[in-house]
Amino acid sequence: MKIGVIGGAGVRTVIFINGLLKRYKKLNIDEVVLYDTDHKKLSVIAKLCRHVVNREGKDLVVREVFEAVDAIKDMDYIVTTLRVGGDHSRVIDESVALKNGVIGQETTGVGGFSMAVRTIPVLMEYCELIETYAPDAWIFNFTNPSGLVTQALHSAGHHRIIGICDAPSSMKYRMAQQLGVTEEELYVEFFGLNHLSWIKSVQVNGEEIMPKLIADDAFLSSIQELEIFDRDVIRKTGMLPNEYLYYYYHRERALANINKSDMTRGQTIEMVNIKMMEELTAMDIDADPEEALQIFLYYMQLRENSYMSIESGSANRPMLEKGSLPVPEGMGYAGVMLDCIEGMQSEEGRTLVLSILNQGCIPFLTDEDVVEVTCKVSKNGIEPVKQATVPAMCELYIRLIKHYERLTVEAVREGSEDKAVAALMTHPLINSYSLAKKLIADYNEAYGEKILGGNA
C-alpha cells in the first residue's frame, strides 16, 4: 500500500517517516511518495527521510515527485499538509490582526480565517485530482485550520476525508505518563470542534477520575496543556480544556503577552525555518547525512520547545545539545493518522479523537457539520461517541464557532466579502461588524489583492 504526501517538504515529514518505520509492516505500507511545490526544500526533506530509513536498516521506499498527480495516482492514503503562502503569510496574518487589537493565531480567530481563505481553494483543486486519480483513497487533512478546512471539503462533497490534530492525542499521552498508566488503560473523552474542545470524562480501567484530577493542583501543573490555565476556570467548568481555549478563557492575557514579546510565533517559526534551510542547503547532505539530520533536529527542538510560550508568557522548555538528538517517534499528527489506519484495518479497532462528520454525535448540530470528538475506528467504520447532553457554555461556544465556519465556507465558495464580514463579526475573538470590515480591508491591502477574489 502507498501513502502520498501533498506538502511533503514540510518539516514534520521527517518525523512522520520515523513514526511510520515502527509499524509500516503491520500497516502493509511499502512506499511513501512526497510532493511539494517547493522543489528545493522537497529534495532536502526527502534526503533526510531516506537517511532516517537507512539508519534503521528498513526497506520502506521514500521518493519525491514534482507533479501532484504522481503523489495521488493509485495511492491508498493521501496526506494534505499545506501552508499556502509560505511561512511569511503567517507573519502577515498575525501582524494585521495585532495592528487591529485582536489575536492572529493561525487556527483561531482572524488569523485562522485568513489562512483558511488562502488554503481552501488550493485544497479543493487537489481533491478534484484525487477524485479522478485515487477515488478510493482516504485523505488525512493535517492542514490548518484543520477543522474549518475539513468542513469546507466535506461541504464540497469530498467525504473520504478525516481531519487530524495532535493536540488531543498529545495531551492524552502526557496524562498517561503522569498517571503512570498505559494509553490503552486510559480513556479520555473529547467533544467539540477542532481547537475548541473539552474533556468531559477521564477513566482508568473504567473508573472515572475526572473530579480527582480537577482538584489536584500538582496534576494540573504537570500537564503542559493545562498549566497555562487558571485553576478556577477549570474547576468551575468541571472539564479539562483543549489548550487553544486559552485564547478564549484568557484572551486579554494572551494578547498582552504577544504584544510585549520581541517576536510573534509566526516570526519565530519563519526565522527558525530560514536558518535551518540555510544550513542544510549549504552542506553536502549526501556526504554527511547524519550531521544534516542533527541540524534538522536541533532546529525542530528549538521550534517545539517554544510552543505556546509567547502567548502564555511562560519560559521556553530546556534544550538538549546538538549532536546526539533522537528523532521523535512521530507521536503527533503522524501518530494519529497511523493509529487511524491501524484501526481501519482491525476488527477490535482504536479509540481516537478525529474531525469527522457529526452523524448525530452533538445533538444541536447537523449531521453534515464537522466536529472533533472521540471515535471508535475499526473495519466497521468511524463511529463518534455520542453526547447525550452538552453543557450550556460549551453549546454557546460551539454554536458560534460552527456558524462562523459555515459562513467562512460560503464566503470562500462565493468570493463574498459580505459573508466574510458576517463570519468574523460572529467570532468571539472579533465580535464587531466595523472591526470585521476593517480586518478584511487590511488583509486585502497587506496581500495586494482581494483575499476572497472579489465580490463585495
Image (cartoon, rainbow, N blue to C red):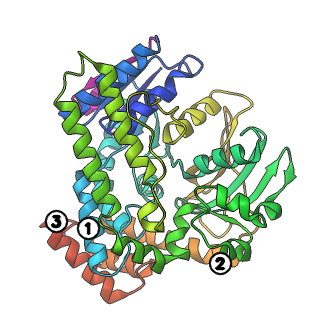
Secondary structure of residue under mark 3: helix
Closer to the camera in the image, 245 or 128:
245
Residue at point 38% right, 34% down? 322
Name the one closer to the observer, 406 or 436: 436
Residue 246: horizontal and vertical position, in percent? 53, 69
Q: Label 2 amino acid?
A: Met
Tell me what residue is drawn at x 30 percent, y 49 percent.
83
* Residue density around tag 1, few if under 14, some if 14–19, many if 20 or more, within 10 Å: many
Rendered residue at 38%/87% (across/down)? 432
Residue behind mark 1: 415
The residue singled out by tag 3 in the image is 447
Alpha-carbon distance for marks 2 and 1?
33 Å
Please give the label number shown on residue 393: 2
Q: Say which residue appears at 25% left-offset and 32% top-offset.
A: 42
Q: Please state the extent of the stretch shown in magenta in the rendering.
A: 58-72
Visible residue check, residue 87:
yes
Q: Which amino acid is tagged 1? A: Gly
Q: Does the magenta-highlighted stretch encompass residue 105?
A: no
114 to the left or right of 139? left
Is disc 1 in contact with disc 3, using a CB cutoff of under 8 Å? no
